[in-house]
Amino acid sequence: MSVGLFIPCYIDQFYPDVGIATLELLEQFGVKVDFPEGQTCCGQPMTNAGCVDDARPLAHRFLHLFKAYDYVVAPSASCVAMVRHHYESHLGNHPDYESLKVKTYELCEFLVEVLKVETLDLSFPYRVGLHESCHGLRELRMGQSSELVGTAFSKSRQLLELIDGLEITTLKRPDECCGFGGTFAVNQEAVSCMMGLDRVADHEQAETQVLTATDMSCLMHLDGLIRRQKKPIHVMHIAQILAGRKPAEVTA
């Protein structure tokens, strides 16, 4: 299979190792990965801010760059949700959009649903807190959100449970929003920070050592609060854990 790797702009600019870890992880499973160098932002920030005319060319560019691949994979639930659920307003009835929509996957989705990963030769002897992002839960349905009745599941947790020595911590509110919300964190800074501090406090009571998620945007927000409060929690994207990275420093 051929996979087009989409790296969100904030990962490209601030957390390049997350993109590298994603590439390494896919290649470990024998996937042929290509990185189209002409890729840009998916257009989510502009769309959320109501700047639809500015976002539309980015959606068309995304389609042009990625339509030829068998799959499109990104280490970001929010960007994938943008493509699958919100590009319709930008691309309309474009004949290639339906195929793009069904072949675009978040990384953990791709590992579980397409590659059918059932074993991982990894050791990560830390207490890990999993942040289930809103886009992953409520738009991609990567896990069971608490407001719905049904069987509990989590594709991200399913992968973490394959890792030797990794203990997933128990949160009191396991699917609560971190408060980032893109431009919401700018427009409603005080509310955003209070929501984030609530999430950090939940991980503290659970004795989380390493906080992980499928969205580096959520982790960026939480990490800023953690560092300012000098909390003993290390932040890692789930791609880094699955690719065999170790936290630089963890308090026992």
Image (cartoon, rainbow, N blue to C red):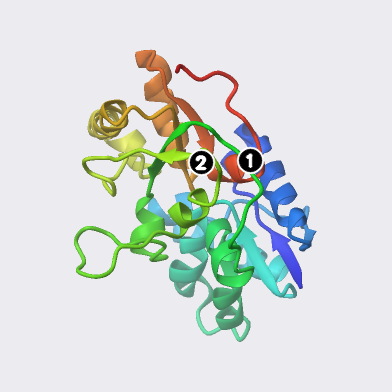
Q: Quadrant of residue 6?
A: bottom right
- The residue singled out by tag 2 in the image is 216
The quadrant in which residue 206 appears is: top left
User: Residue 170 got which mark?
Assistant: none
Mark-to-mark CA distance, 2 and 1: 8 Å
Give me the residue at 75% from left, 75% from top. 68
Query: Which quadrant: the N terminus?
Result: bottom right
Q: Residue at x 31, y 37 (%)?
A: 187
Q: Nearer the viewer, residue 179 or 39?
A: 179
Residue 225 or residue 199, whichever sits in front: 199
Residue at x 77%, y 55% (from the top left corner) = 27
Looking at the picture, how far across and down is residue 66, in whole percent?
A: 70, 68
Mark number for residue 18? 1
Image position, residue 14 (x, y; %)? 61, 32
**CA neighbours of label 1 inside 10 A, class few (<14), some (14 to 19), many (20+):** many
- Tell me if residue 55 can be seen: yes
- Tell me the SS state at disc 1: helix
For this view, does 197 lie left or right of residue 122? left
Answer left or right for 173 relative to 46.
left
Farthest residue in the front direction? 165
- The location of residue 33, given as percent across then percent down, is 78, 60
Judged left or right of residue 205, residue 115 is right
Marks 2,1: beta carbons within 8 A? yes
Vertical order, 50 against 169 (above or below)? below
| Count of picture labels | 2
Secondary element under disc 2, as helix, strand or loop, is helix
Q: Position of residue 37 (x, y in %)?
A: 78, 53
- Inspect the image, locate mark 1, and give the three-letter code of the amino acid beneath it: Val
Residue 118 vertical placement versus 179 (above, below):
below
Question: Is residue 35 visible to us here?
Answer: no
Q: Nearer the viewer, residue 72 or 51?
A: 72
